[in-house]
Amino acid sequence: MRTVRLITAALALAGIVLIAAGPAKLLDLVPYFTIQSSLLYGGYVAWTARCGGTTTDPVLKGAATLYVVITGLVYHLVLTNPHSGFAVPAVHRVLVDEIGTQLLHTVVPLLAVLDWLVFDARGRFRWRDAGYWLAYPLAYLAFALIRGAIVDEYPYPFLDVTQLGYRGVTITALVFAVAFWLLGLLFVLIDQAPVLVRRRRQPR
């Protein structure tokens, strides 16, 4: 468990460093949800690994895991999916940039899910946690819109007010919020499933 978490934290950091080693400047990467969620998850699992690997705050671990999973899903299902309506035009990336991109959008989310499913105890989430976990995505939405209004630049096409208008961005944000909430509920369901099964098997 400790080894997996140290490896995942190292890969998250490596992904950020490799992307920053490409054409993009480090400060230009900070506004992206990908970078922020990877830093959050990598930092948290590195800290738990340093403390012996024990997850002391399952709700925070669930939040960090959810956010990197969102990063992976949005990248593969929305940003690189030509049928999504928000696909980013294909660009030629230098090798280090491409490796870093795949680490943050594919490898780290998969390792995060593996860590959670294999090593974390079940029955520690509550249904209301799915709502609490929306706090950061909603705060990120506010940050992206305020920053965009100041610098006239938006990190993702589905947040681009200049293209969609505030009405379009609001509708898109509501759709994403519902999708993220449902994904959070799926996390809770998977977490609670063994507990629910045990309760049903208990004699009455």
Image: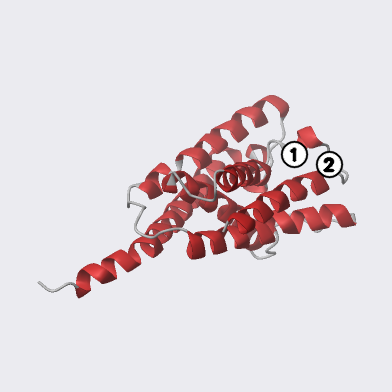
What's the CA distance linking mark 1 and mark 2? 7 Å
**Mark linked to residue 157:** none
Q: Residue furthest top?
A: 150
Q: In the image, is residue 82 above or below residue 42?
A: below
Instruction: Name which quarter of the figure residue 150 lies in.
Output: top right
Q: Position of residue 61 (x, y in %)?
A: 49, 48
Which sits earlier in the primary sequence, circle 1 or circle 2? 2
Left or right placement of residue 68 versus residue 81 in this view: left
Q: Would you identify the image quadrant in which residue 134 lies? A: top left
The image shows residue 167, relative to residue 54, as above or below, that is: above
Label 2 belongs to which residue? 24
Identity of the residue furthest to the front in this view: 52
Helix, strand or loop for disc 2: loop
Q: Would you say the residues marked 1 and 2 are in contact, meaning their CB atoms lie under 8 Å apart?
A: yes
Question: For the point 21% across and 75% down, which residue is it?
Answer: 201
- The x, y position of residue 144, in whole percent, is 62, 35
Q: Which mark is residue 29?
A: 1
Residue 92 seen by the camera: no
* Amino acid beneath label 2: Ala
Nearer to the camera, 63 or 165: 63
Q: Quadrant of the C terminus?
A: bottom left
- Specify whether 81 is left or right of 168: right
Q: What residue appears at the point 39 percent right and 50 percent down from the top-left corner? A: 130
- Give the position of the N terminus as an image quadrant: bottom right
In the structure shown, which secondary structural element does the residue marked by tag 1 occupy? helix
Question: Could you tell whether 202 is left or right of 35 in the image?
Answer: left
The amino acid at mark 1 is Leu
